[in-house]
Image (tube, coloured by chain):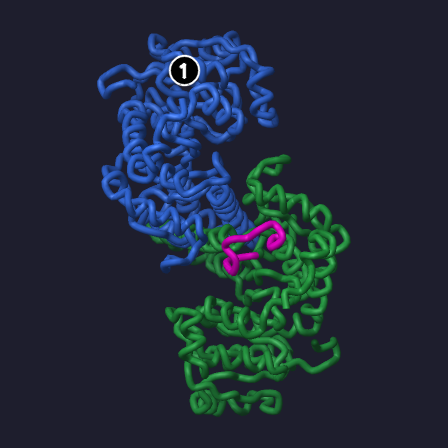
Chain colours: A blue, B green
Amino acid sequence: MTGSAAPCTIAVDVMGSDLGPSEFIRGLLYAREELKLDSEIILVGKERLLERLLKAQKSKFALGKLRIHHASEVVDMDDKPVMAMRSKKDASMFQAVNLLKEGEAHAVVSCGNTGALMAAGTIRLRPLEGVERPALGTIIPTKQKPCVLIDVGANPESNSLNLVHNAILGTNYARSALNLEQPRVGLLTIGTEDGKGNSLINETHAKLQQMGSIIHYIGPVEGFQIFEGDVDVVVCDGFVGNVLLKSSEAVFKFVGKTIRDELRRNAKRMLGAALAKSAFSDMRTRLSPDHHAGAPLLGLKGNILKSHGSSNYIAIANAIRIASEIVRHDMLDSIQSDILQANATLLEPSETASPE
Amino acid sequence: MTGSAAPCTIAVDVMGSDLGPSEFIRGLLYAREELKLDSEIILVGKERLLERLLKAQKSKFALGKLRIHHASEVVDMDDKPVMAMRSKKDASMFQAVNLLKEGEAHAVVSCGNTGALMAAGTIRLRPLEGVERPALGTIIPTKQKPCVLIDVGANPESNSLNLVHNAILGTNYARSALNLEQPRVGLLTIGTEDGKGNSLINETHAKLQQMGSIIHYIGPVEGFQIFEGDVDVVVCDGFVGNVLLKSSEAVFKFVGKTIRDELRRNAKRMLGAALAKSAFSDMRTRLSPDHHAGAPLLGLKGNILKSHGSSNYIAIANAIRIASEIVRHDMLDSIQSDILQANATLLEPSETASPE
């Protein structure tokens, strides 16, 4: 793992995005010029295509900190994960993960097929010692500061130990990505009275209460509290988190569409909307996920960030920025030590032995 | 059960609302005058208070179809359900449920403590034959027509048979409340490919595919599809549904607050907002739950509708309207027959025997 002062290299899978590889080149440019990022970048994808795209931008780049790693294949969005790992060995995503495994890169950023990225991460890199199931974290906006929601889909069938691990993974991610010292952790439930929720939640709550030295657990939180901003890490299983994330995005869009429809209904409203236009664009910026794009697959022996398939250049630049923050914070070392400490408290000695 | 032409009596617990009993009197007035509702109403609550409130409105009411049933106590929002059932026997909510059990009313509407209402419904009325767990349905807005979401919190620990029953309960509720002949049923999951989701979802999917003669199952749906309006009944367990409902409401409010903040930031925006004001109020009306207020507790031997604690008079009037629709549609008979048919298909003969 790389210390704070050491150089940091990020392998970027440029092939899996909806907007095409050129959006990555724009994102890289933005990361260099606006975010002042000086990590070394390895662009993983079709060499000739990337050379052509870079040539068009050449004067703008410090090419010394950029190189191309050729990969002849691409994982498609509808490829079956494990099948793709077998049949498309030279896909850009898998090559990027290989660079990570071989120590040539310290983190991977990809917009590609989530399932394939999770499979490659889990099978190639392996989970950290003591972690049963990796989890996908993401950052969502709230009325106050943004917060981490974990798990948003990696593990739809969790037990209470998995959820405690999610709390540890999310805490460490919030430290790196949101720059928080002691993130407040809440357990997502329905009704915060003792005994409400379900048996999984009650069991997890009891275990989280024993984690005082590792995380700052503030107790159960309800769905309506997530966007208040009173909690920095919201812990749930991958089924609930995925439904929550996708439905919340859908509500954002639905409300936006309804406002647009209503504002177009007559001339007076249209004039009003024109005058207030900047308010709507500022709102979009405030609620936009672009500045925190990049959902890390946490709990693995390596840093993998998944960005949304439709990420624009700003989102891509920020995913690269967050990847370098994670490396700078030695997040993996910190997760490993917290997980082992938690398992020592929660598991019988016979259960904590490494499976290998 | 009451047939289409038979009279319909609704017991209304007027004491549990955040806005007080007077909001119920306004709601009743609205139901009579605007919604043209002629069901007989039993107001359950403190007699002298109600008489005083009614006196102020007397000229406006057809008092012939209205009577008061005195109840001296009130279930508070923080009362423990089963404890309240023991210690507050004369609470308006429990008296209303008693009227239902004794056949004096065909439906109950209450804004009170959800847990206490569920406990009273489940313990006093009992579930219909073959139903293990009642479920709480609700109606949410979508880009097209509104849809039913079930379960939103009654049963946070469901098995696949419970979820199939939710599909049947939701279908019958959508027929009554949304006036649909053959509602399209979707199973909420994460990723609609075969084998995604979790084992509960995969098991439920297989069972729902056998329900072709009872419900119109169109397959799994993801969180982002709920608000598209392509499905009329969204089936999930009470944990997921409650998180989804509460977080969606929170997103609505959060987006609304962000727009308001942004529109107040300078004079030009404020002028624009003033010109477009009607667009925002029309939007609130379109997205408002008032017209479909009333979440029924389904699967019981009686019609119980829970309205939001903060329901205004329009929401209350519509809850009473929906209660009378449920009675008019003979919803209970129809649910009972569908449940028995489903159980005959899904259970071994030994399992379908009535537990009594």
User: Residue B24: horizontal and vertical position, in percent?
Assistant: 49, 78
Q: For this rendering, which residue is in front, A151 or A322?
A: A151
User: Residue A39: horizontal and vertical position, in percent?
Assistant: 32, 17
User: Residue A151: horizontal and vertical position, in percent?
Assistant: 43, 38
- In this rendering, is residue B230 above or below A60? below
User: Residue B141: horizontal and vertical position, in percent?
Assistant: 57, 56
Q: For this rendering, which residue is in front, B61 or B12?
A: B12
Give the letter of the chain under mark 1: A
- Tell me the quadrant of the picture where the N terminus of chain B can be found: bottom right
| Residue A294, quarter of the rendered image | top left
- In this rendering, is residue B253 above or below A305? below
| Residue B91, quarter of the rendered image | bottom left
* Residue at figure coordinates x 68%, y 47% from the top left: B207
How many numbered dots are placed on residues in this image? 1
A48 within the magenta span:
no
Write down the region rendered in magenta.
B151-163
* Residue at figure coordinates x 45%, y 18% from the top left: A97
* Residue at figure coordinates x 75%, y 50% from the top left: B212
- Visible in this render: residue B76? yes
Q: Main secondary structure of the magenta part?
A: loop
Residue B51 as seen in the image, left or right of residue B130: left
Would you name the residue on which mark 1 appears?
Answer: A101
Per the image, label 1 sits on a secondary structure element best described as: helix
Mark 1 surroundings within 10 Å by alpha-carbon count, few (fewer than 14), some (14 through 19), many (20 or more): some
- Tell me the quadrant of the picture where the C terminus of chain B can be found: bottom right
The amino acid pointed to by label 1 is: Lys
Q: For this rendering, which residue is in front, A345 or B269?
A: A345
- In this rendering, is residue B131 above or below B314? above
